[in-house]
Image (tube, helix red, strand yellow):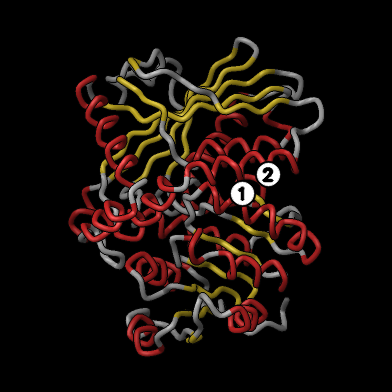
Amino acid sequence: MSDRDHDIVLLGATGFTGRLIASYLAEAAPPSARLGLAGRSEAKLAEVAATLGRDVALVVVDATDPVGLRRLADSTRVLMTTVGPYTAHGDPVVAACAAAGTDYLDLCGESEFVDETYLRHHSTAVGSGARLVHACGFDSIPHDLGAQFAVERLGVDPTEAVDVRGHVRMAGTFSGGTFASALGAMSRMRQASSARKRRLALEGEPAGRTITIGTPRLGRSADTGRWSLPMPTLDPQIVADSARRLPAYGRSFTYSHLLDAESGLAMAGLVAGVGAVAGLAQIPPARKALSRRVPQGTGPSEEKRAAAWFRVRFFAEAGGRRVVTEVSGGDPGYTETSKMMSEAALCLAFDDLETTSGQVTTAEAMGPALRRRLDAAGITFRVLPEGIGGADAP
């Protein structure tokens, strides 16, 4: 694709998260990289471009215009998009990239969208050579690459049964766009379940192997000593999708995804709060009222982002062996998500990777190469001393 005008284009560059990504990408990309910003307003794009300290191309396009999107996809090697909620706005962008053979990345945390785009566009992308990579932010890079890192450090025989449990701790806030996506996903749980079943029926289980998402109970964890609850996010689905494609995860692989709370009372509050929001999301007027509380295009201040952090600990076991690993970083939703999305795009554009195509995960498409990039950018992957992982661990 050396004849294309751009190496990487960011669609949605004028939104809250888009501006953060544009800033990081402009600084991290090599001077020779041909970057572009895309969106509906040329004036807003020019405003963002003026802050970047390097020349970038501006592409005016509407995310609902298939013809314009196809022209955009034809012009670049890699297309990143922050335009969500993706179930409502994302499919035309994926379609354009799959047809054009253009690598695609998003920040999607919506299960239904991930599975529907597999059903609609995976085979086209396999034919064109496009790599369609969802969930390239906190959903779900730390969990997908973290589980892969734990499996590698455990040293798994292909015939073994592997059990991995990821425990998440974090402090941070969210933007209006993230809240809108979450509300949309909560209101479409039945549709998401249907899409998942149809995808798995089409894709099938890998021959001779079993991949399972664990269903841990509420309560105090034997791994960490903290109160834990199952985390109903896209992350375990992405980890399971990686395990289906990568035999190194063993003959039988189970992944459980948990959110750690500081106390039983805090856990009860989380359960009650999420349950209330999920219930209100089923009622259109209530959903609309909730969305107005955190308008799209807004997000946490720089001070709040500076105080935020995340830590994900993985407890991996196979054949009587055990390893504890950790992925950690700063503000999960925005500062570190901007790094993850940008470094993933740079990895696809410039690193020497194994050949993949179709809808792929970050672990399948980039794996160790992306981990090296993130580690250099301050998002660390490490093996913890044996036995560390409880409530008093550093």
Closer to the camera in the image, 104 or 373: 104
Residue type pointed to by label 1: Asp
- Would you place residue 394 above or below residue 76 in this image? above
Residue 210, quarter of the rendered image? top right
Residue 40 coordinates in the image, percent (x, y) = 43, 83
Q: Residue at x 41, y 45 (%)?
A: 186
Residue 297 coordinates in the image, percent (x, y) = 30, 68
CA gap, disc 1 to disc 2? Answer: 6 Å
Closer to the camera in the image, 48 or 39: 39
- Would you place residue 131 above or below residue 224 in this image? below
Residue type pointed to by label 2: Arg
Could you tell whether 228 is left or right of 78 in the image?
left
Q: Residues within 10 Å of mark 1 (few under 14, many from 20)?
A: many
Q: Residue at x 52, y 76 (%)?
A: 64
> Is tag 1's residue or tag 2's residue first in the polypeptide sequence?
1
Q: Residue at x 60, y 81 (%)?
A: 72
Q: Residue at label 1?
A: 115
Question: Does the CB distance between marks 1 and 2 fall below 8 Å?
Answer: yes
Quarter of the image with the N terminus is bottom right
Closer to the camera in the image, 148 or 380: 148
Q: Residue at x 34, y 41 (%)?
A: 278
Residue 282 coordinates in the image, percent (x, y) = 36, 46
Q: Residue at label 2?
A: 199
The number of discs equals: 2
